Image (cartoon, rainbow, N blue to C red):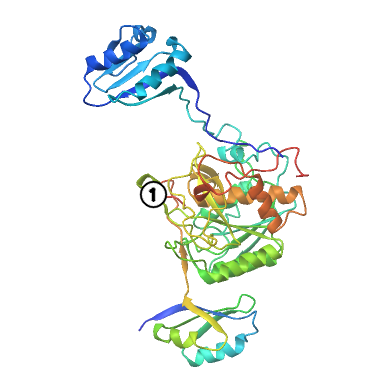
Amino acid sequence: MAQISVKVVFDAKGGADAETICEKASEHGLTVEQVQRAMGVIFGQCDDSVVDQLEALDGVLRVSPEGTFQLPPLSPDKPQ
Amino acid sequence: MSKTTFEMQPPHETGGSIVLFKPDVDLSTQQSILASLSGADVQTFASRAGRLPESADEAPAIVLENVNIGFISAQVGAAQSESIRANLMDDDRVLSVRPELYLFALKTIQDDDQKTWGVDAVGAWASRYTGAGIKVAVLDTGLDLQHPDFADRTIVSESFVTGEDVQDGQGHGTHCAGTAVGGRTSDRDFRYGVASDADLYVGKVLANSGSGRERDVLIGMAWAIEQGCEVISMSLGSDVREGDTYSPEYEALGRQALDRGSLIIAAAGNSSSRRLGFVAPVGSPANAPSIMAVAAVDEALSVADFSSGGINPDGGEVNVAGPGVDVFSSVPAPRLYRSLSGTSMACPHVAGVAAHWAESDQNLRGQALWDKIIETAAPVSEDARDLGAGLVQSPPAAAGVA
């Protein structure tokens, strides 16, 4: 049971409605932080135990942890 | 259009032969074998440090003590050399025999007093194109907006990092922007930027700590496409495992970019340790099929030790290579300049060259620009898994009509 940042990928091309998905996802515990309609992605936070429920929502293609990027220290000794 | 190639020199024979005897063949037997074939006495020499005496050069054949190696001189003549080698190949006391070859120092390209080796190697120095009129986005840690080398440049900027402005507090973004579209050092007129007249679009998607959220990167990519940038350079990524596939969000944006006349170029990643025999797969987002993955070469035009390779299929291939070792470019004040290595440095070289091609022909946009970069890359000796189509090349002075 841990709070995680997730990206909820929905079927924007197939006509899935972002508002409806946000509403349903919120009912399942997703705190919606950002909606990218054209990209078909909702960013937010939820408990890791509800990921399967979010993925089962109509119009949702995939729910996965939001990735991060990390550069190494700026040094000639470390490939950048 | 002719292509520059950087392939190894073809083997060039001296006319002599090198013989490797089996370990259990004693020195006097080695001497007698070569003597019977060359028709002359065979001297032996100790293989100590330092050159052999002149008498060794004059002898028709010699044997080196303790290493089981013999040499037959070119002076026996080509026809006889071939016949001797044929006889030796049939002798079960001989492990191998082959023509002796001249060896050449590997060609390397170095910074000189006018330009970096990278600007030279990609043909930017010789090209008449400068990226003028082309919008190049660099999505990274931002830019040192006060850097003297970027004064008087057209710069559009936006920060996607919560609580941070575009000013680069880390240095990576200023270095990458310098390579892609920087110019010359303000103090000594030394050129390190590839597309020095391009318009720079700075999207800050990584924080001053060097970290970034995926959402900021995706939104930054969408912003650069929306701005109509013909070239989008992303020197960032995260590792993937062997067998992993690409993230569909990056592919969707890469595809959208190509459809709208933009080309997204990304660093392949630095997770290989080739000296130890490990080649890591191209990372994300460079592994998306519609995003161009860039590997790094060193000054000898060999694949860099750290450069990730085409291990995974379906977009995980390396597409092209750029200079990525000891690359001199700009960093924020007070330091102003620094040399760094990585596919992060190779990626903006490709972005700069892409701007040259886009300037050379207004039809070279999106997929057409991708195809031109691949088609004109200079083949190198390593295989496509490591360096894709080869070393990226700017349109030469006479180009424009490809």
Question: Which chain is mark 1 on?
Answer: B
Q: Which of the pair A27/B211 is nearer the observer?
A: A27
Q: Quadrant of residue B22?
A: top left
The crowding category of the residue bearing disc 1, from other C-alpha atoms within 10 Å (few below 14, some 14 to 19, many at least 20), is some
Kind of residue at badge 1: Ser
Left or right for B211, reference B40: right
- Residue B263 vertical position relative to residue B121 in the rendered view, above or below: below
At horizontal 34% and vertical 24% (from top left) the residue drawn is B90
Q: Quadrant of the N terminus of chain A?
A: bottom left
> Is B259 rendered above or below residue B115?
below
Residue A77 at x, y percent in the picture: 40, 46
Say left or right for B30 vs A12: left
Of B225 and A62, nearer the camera is A62
> Measured from the top left, where is residue B49 in percent x and y?
29, 19
Residue B331 can be seen in this image: no
Give the x, y percent position of residue B48.
27, 18
Q: Residue at x 51, y 79 (%)?
A: A62
Which picture quadrant has residue B262? Answer: bottom right
Q: Is residue B97 above or below residue A74?
A: above
Please state the total of marks drawn on the protein image. 1
The reply to whether residue B172 is in sight is yes
Give the x, y percent position of residue B66.
23, 21
Q: Mark 1 falls on what kind of element?
A: loop
Compared across the picture, whether B89 is left or right of B164 comes to left
Q: Is residue B381 above or below residue B363?
A: above
Left or right: residue B395 compared with residue B99: right
Residue on which the image places disc 1: B273
